[in-house]
Amino acid sequence: MYTLKKSLGQHFLKDEEIILDIIGALKKDEFARLLEVGPGAGALTKHLIQLPGIDFKAVELDEEKITYLEKTYPILKDKIIHQSFLDIDQPFTEPFVVIGNFPYNISTQILFKILDWKDHVPVIIGMFQKEVAERAAAKPGSKAFGVLSALIQPFYDIEYLFDVPPDRFNPPPKVMSGVIRLTRKTTVLTVRSDKAYKNLVKTAFNQRRKTLRNAVKSLFYPEELKDPIFNKRAEALSIEDFAALTFKMQ
């Protein structure tokens, strides 16, 4: 068997109904390559490896889980990348879908890493701490709208699919979980540069209680800061607003 490692944030999904709901969400899209992040004991994996005609890979840091998975599902031999997701190279050269019960302690970093691969990843289906899932899907004007929302939403439409209570895991986490689907947009925002957009968003939300004028004044000439939009706070701006402002930055 295997042991659960608290240090790796391991909470394994045990509810078969929830598992099948996630698989059902995945099947709504056509794809040829699939990467699972953190297969753990194989709750999702056992279904994923049965999908016909799919080039499947998984990334798992825990060597004990890799040994267990390869013994339980021999088809996984040579299909598991033994690394932290944050350290791996892009696993496919052609487009691929990402799925996973993401380790909650690095889930935001996982999304930001996938952003680097955005032109190769049309769909992501992930389980997150509910608070993180809600932040990713949040709309401008809401308290949950922040850096995560504003950096991901220019590239992906985000749908909050369903909640997953703590008792559906072993061991139960102390938080509610949520599953979201991210679908690559066919039309993306026009920005001065990805770097400028990211800098503006991070600077604006770094002092989100201040008006935009005070939060981002170092990025603009004084004349530009007279625009009434700078009277707003960061969460009141849409991603289109941020994109337009990138062209007025110093």
Image: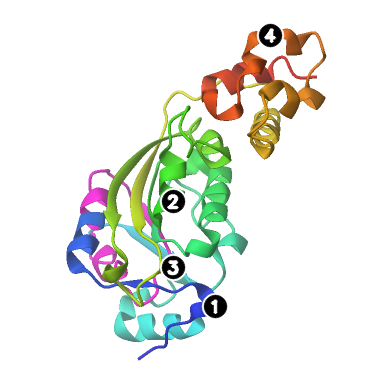
Please say if 197 is above or below 120. above
- Say which quarter of the image contains residue 197: top right
Give the side of residue 188 with respect to residue 196, left or right: left
Residue 38's disc is: 3
Secondary structure of residue under mark 1:
helix
Quadrant occupied by the N terminus: bottom left
Q: Position of residue 67 (x, y in %)?
A: 43, 85
Tell me which numbered mark, 1 or 2, is placed earlier along the sequence.
1
Quadrant occupied by the C terminus: top right
Tell me which numbered mark, 4 or 3, is placed earlier along the sequence.
3
The type of residue carrying mark 2 is Glu
Distance CA(mark 1)–CA(mark 4): 49 Å
Tell me which numbered mark, 2 or 3, is placed earlier along the sequence.
3
Q: Which of labels 2 and 3 is toward the front? A: 2
Q: Residues within 10 Å of mark 3 (few under 14, many from 20)?
A: many
Q: Residue at x 29, y 59 (%)?
A: 164
Q: Position of residue 97 (x, y in %)?
A: 39, 50
Q: Which residue was labeled with disc 4?
A: 227
